Image (spheres, coloured by chain):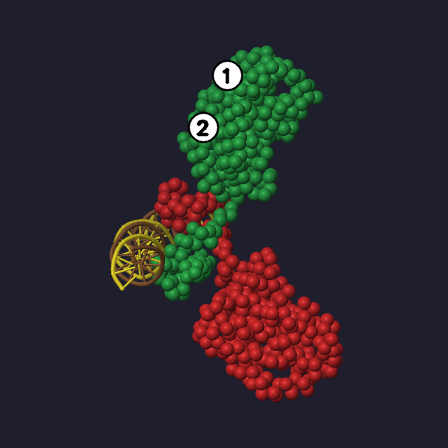
Chain colours: A green, B red, C brown, D yellow
Amino acid sequence: MVSTESAAANELLAVRAAELYYEENKTQDEIGAILRVTRWKVGRLLSQARERGIIRIEIVHPRARRLALERELGARFGLKDAIVVPAPVDEVELQARVAEAAADYLVSVRPVPRLLGVSWGRTLHQVAESLPVGWSTGVNVVQINGGVSLSKRPGTAASTAVMIAQKAGGQATLLPSPAILERLETKKAIESDRTVGGVVQMARGAAAYLFSAGVADTSSVHVDSGYLTADDIAELRERGAVGDVIGRYITADGTIADPELDARTLGLGLEELRSAASSILVIGGEAKHAVARAIVTHGLCSVIVTDEHTARALLDDLDGDAAADASAGAPDSGSSGAAAPSGHHDSPAEGSAS
Amino acid sequence: MVSTESAAANELLAVRAAELYYEENKTQDEIGAILRVTRWKVGRLLSQARERGIIRIEIVHPRARRLALERELGARFGLKDAIVVPAPVDEVELQARVAEAAADYLVSVRPVPRLLGVSWGRTLHQVAESLPVGWSTGVNVVQINGGVSLSKRPGTAASTAVMIAQKAGGQATLLPSPAILERLETKKAIESDRTVGGVVQMARGAAAYLFSAGVADTSSVHVDSGYLTADDIAELRERGAVGDVIGRYITADGTIADPELDARTLGLGLEELRSAASSILVIGGEAKHAVARAIVTHGLCSVIVTDEHTARALLDDLDGDAAADASAGAPDSGSSGAAAPSGHHDSPAEGSAS
DNA sequence: CGCCTCTCTGCTCATGTGAGCAGGGCCGCA
DNA sequence: TGCGGCCCTGCTCACATGAGCAGAGAGGCG
């Protein structure tokens, strides 16, 4: 009873001490005089107050980061680096923050990559826009997956790579090919063309890759751009696809969802991403948690730039283990089943032509 | 342009420094090494961050206080002391916090008042309940306004004073009289009774007064207790009454709303409250802002215990100056106008009798 | 073009603060 | 009642920090 009472009294003292210290900027000595305790006790009270969460210190700034989450992510998934930004309520704002953080990160990477491989998409375009002019000197950029011309809106594919290169005073090398070809032969043919093959070859030599990922649903840029139809997406989802990485649709277990489709997808392969020294994933938002998980849990990126909700979702053991378990059992059915149905990909091309 | 750019860069640095300092517990020297600036600059960045509100330090505890507001209140209204507690969203909780704070204050007042004058009501009862047993030694309590017996619920009038005294190991002296008498003659008669008159006389000698205030509406304890009817309240409101202090209804300009009614009100007068060395007002909640303002702007209390919303409302210049201006112009009309109409207070008495 | 001023930088020094340690009171237990 | 263990207190000392100051660089103005 006595201990309870004194504990409560101590807590009150701690609160008073915290107020005087943090709000009134008094020294611990002065506080000691006011509260009639020694300054050492004041120090201890303040420590207690911090430990017990009575004092909440928050950094309110759009560019703030979540270093604790970054450390956890890095440790848990063996990443070279992790950047986590606080998530604003607004999804649009969130994407902007993540893109900004990715741009900041890119600016600060040492050593500066001489050649940077980039994919494209809404996210990457925002990253490109967020980069300051002159963010580096002489960084050349190479596109790592196809998709230059199909979408006519500015801010996709080509312009992304070009903008990143321009702002660093370097050259952009584009991959002059669709992301996904209609027929495997066409893909092989175009791939063997020196212009295209050379670019892919160059991409393989990039010191770092910057990429994002798409969700396997109809909001995908692949549907927007006409490479895939809603039916294709439905098919992919049935095969367990959670999203795409540099154009290649993967399942939760990190494997290719549909090898036939993948064979017709032009650009860098997943293995090249996996083995790269620096592959920077930029991803944010609720919808992309599944694909983000697939990527980080299977080593497809060495650096992640994301928001705190995504980070927490990735670290959350419940989901984490569940997804891991699911992926452990799935690969077999995924790869064996994927080979069987094929040649159902005429519609996307028609869609793109209209 | 250059200055803008470097200012932005500085802000970013400040954010990073703040993160490392407050979230990662690194020393300014270490941070300097990380951010490639000197430790002095880190210190400056942190100062900036604090000044510019990038760092938000909050003390989350039910017993926390708002020292800045307390200081402002004290300075603005010439108070001896001010206690401001953070306002929880819940009104019930808010009342409890204010009462608790008042109890804390009472415990800590030095010198300890040998004789404490108290009023009664819901708020004061909560204060009494919040006082710890043995909060002081030998503090006697005297009731400063009538109202012992009319309400039969426990926790009003008498029990408040008794509880406060008991918990301090002192004697309670009650005022054995209704708060408001039906007829002036009765009031004068009862007042001249030695039992009653003596108590009032004793109350005048109290070293400190503890009181709250009521709102001039039908939720008032005066209506509950049957001293006043809804019609009386309506009448009082027409005369500009904002609420009651120790049973006496006052207007925004701090004067008696209805002198005739006031003459029939038994207990300490406002002047005695005003001239007291220590008169502690305990008041909280949106509804009581107006009466709280009337009290503090006209010197009826020397100490206020309240919530932060009330405090801010009191300090808010817009309302503040408006009320001050009104009160500056009003006293004359208030005192002269109040004397004219009288003798219309039979109904309240009838109401209380029924 | 040169000077002036104003701000920002990196320093010295005094002060503020936290880690670690010895002593003392309080408890349970014999 | 005496003993041992425990926690809490107040201290020493080393380190971290903020105040104040001289010098350097960037603009602005004549």
Frontmost residue, B83 versus A126: B83
Circle 2 chain: A
Label 2 belongs to which residue? A278
* Image x and y of residue A57, in percent: 47, 50
* Image x and y of residue A337, in percent: 58, 18
Q: Residues within 10 Å of mark 1 (few under 14, many from 20)?
A: some
Label 1 belongs to which residue? A198
Where is A252 relative to A13, above or below? above
Question: For residue B173, which quarter of the picture?
Answer: bottom right
Tell me the kind of residue under disc 1. Gly
In the rendered image, is residue A154 in sight? yes
Tell me the kind of residue under disc 2. Ser
Question: For residue A262, which quarter of the picture?
Answer: top right
Q: Is residue A160 left or right of residue B48?
A: right
The kind of secondary structure element at disc 1 is: helix
Q: Residue at x 47, y 44 (%)?
A: B12
Where is B111 relative to B67, above or below? below
* Image x and y of residue B111, in percent: 44, 75
- The quarter of the picture where the N terminus of chain A appears is bottom left
Q: Residue at x 57, y 69 (%)?
A: B125
Frontmost residue, B10 versus B215: B215
For the residues tagged 2 and 1, is the chain the same?
Answer: yes
* Image x and y of residue A341, in percent: 62, 15
Give how far apart the Cα atoms at labels 2 and 1 are: 21 Å
- The quarter of the picture where the C terminus of chain A appears is top right
Q: Residue at x 60, y 39 (%)?
A: A91
Q: Residues within 10 Å of mark 2 (few under 14, many from 20)?
A: many
The kind of secondary structure element at disc 2 is: loop
In the rendered image, is residue B243 in sight? no
